[in-house]
Image: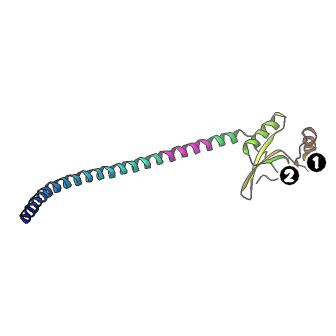
């Protein structure tokens, strides 16, 4: 009797498992369908995110290029306003040499207000740019030395006389 009960239990359990497995297969298929749909949505979202990131990067690059162009135009306009180096070769008095273009521009304004005609030249030494603030082109050394003495006397500046050639 005990064996009959045990055998009956196994038969009922087998029927239950077979019946459930069809339902389980259907549920698994539905779940797989839903998961593949979510995977597709995730793939689509990733593609949209990639294209959005690419578009944002391109826009940022365009904006940066526009800013750089505007800055270059502004600097060109500022340089156009600056006094030009006088024509000719000879001697000049250098009143300053600095790494900062804005400071060199400030010095040009200061010496212009004092009645001089300063100008800026630039030079690169060992990959470092320098802006030289200079005054005048003199045909002879004596005239350049006279201006040097005047600047040293009036403003206590340590200036020097330099030879300038128009090709520099």
Is residue 61 found inside the magenta-colored segment of the image?
Answer: yes
- Give the extent of the magenta segment: 59-72
- As drawn, the residue found furthest toward the front would be 1
Q: Quadrant of residue 68?
A: top right
- As drawn, the residue found furthest toward the bottom would be 3
In space, the residues marked 1 and 2 are separated at their CA atoms by: 12 Å
- Is residue 128 something that shows in the picture? yes
Is residue 87 found inside the magenta-colored segment of the image?
Answer: no
Q: Quadrant of residue 118?
A: top right
Tally of numbered discs: 2
Q: Residue at x 66, y 40 (%)?
A: 77
Q: Judging from the image, what secondary structure is the residue with disc 2 in?
A: strand
- Crowdedness of circle 1 by 10 Å Cα count: few (<14), some, many (20+)? few
- Is residue 83 something that shows in the picture? no
How far from the left and from the top, in percent, is residue 53? 43, 48
Q: Residue at x 75, y 53 (%)?
A: 123
Q: Residue at x 73, y 40 (%)?
A: 82
Residue 142's disc number: 1
In this picture, residue 97 sits left or right of residue 77: right
In this picture, residue 91 sits left or right of residue 11: right
- Crowdedness of circle 2 by 10 Å Cα count: few (<14), some, many (20+)? some
How far from the left and from the top, in percent, is residue 62? 50, 45
Q: Which is the main secondary structure of the residues drawn in magenta?
A: helix
In this picture, residue 167 sits left or right of residue 53: right
Q: Are marks 1 and 2 in contact (CB under 8 Å)?
A: no
The quadrant of the picture occupied by the N terminus is: bottom left
How far from the left and from the top, in percent, is residue 141? 91, 50
For mark 2, what is the residue? Answer: 162
Nearest to N terminus: mark 1 or mark 2: 1
Of tags 1 and 2, the one toward the viewer is: 2
Q: Residue at x 75, y 41 (%)?
A: 105
């Amino acid at each position: 009797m005990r064996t009959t009960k045990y055998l009956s239990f196994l038969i009922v359990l087998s029927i239950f498992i077979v019946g459930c497995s069809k339902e389980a297969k259907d549920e698994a298929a539905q779940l797989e369908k839903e998961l593949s749909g979510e995977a597709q949505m995730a793939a689509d979202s990733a593609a949209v995110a990639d294209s959005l990131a690419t578009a944002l990067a391109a826009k940022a690059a365009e904006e940066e290029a526009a800013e750089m162009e505007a800055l270059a135009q502004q600097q060109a306009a500022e340089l156009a306003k600056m006094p030009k180096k006088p024509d000719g070769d000879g001697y000049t008095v250098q009143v300053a040499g600095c790494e900062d273009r804005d400071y060199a521009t400030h010095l040009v304004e200061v010496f212009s207000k004092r009645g001089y005609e300063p100008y800026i030249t630039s030079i690169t030494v060992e990959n470092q740019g320098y802006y030289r603030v200079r005054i005048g082109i003199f045909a002879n050394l004596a005239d350049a030395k006279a201006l040097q003495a005047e600047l040293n006397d009036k403003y206590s500046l340590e200036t020097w006389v330099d030879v300038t050639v128009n090709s520099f």
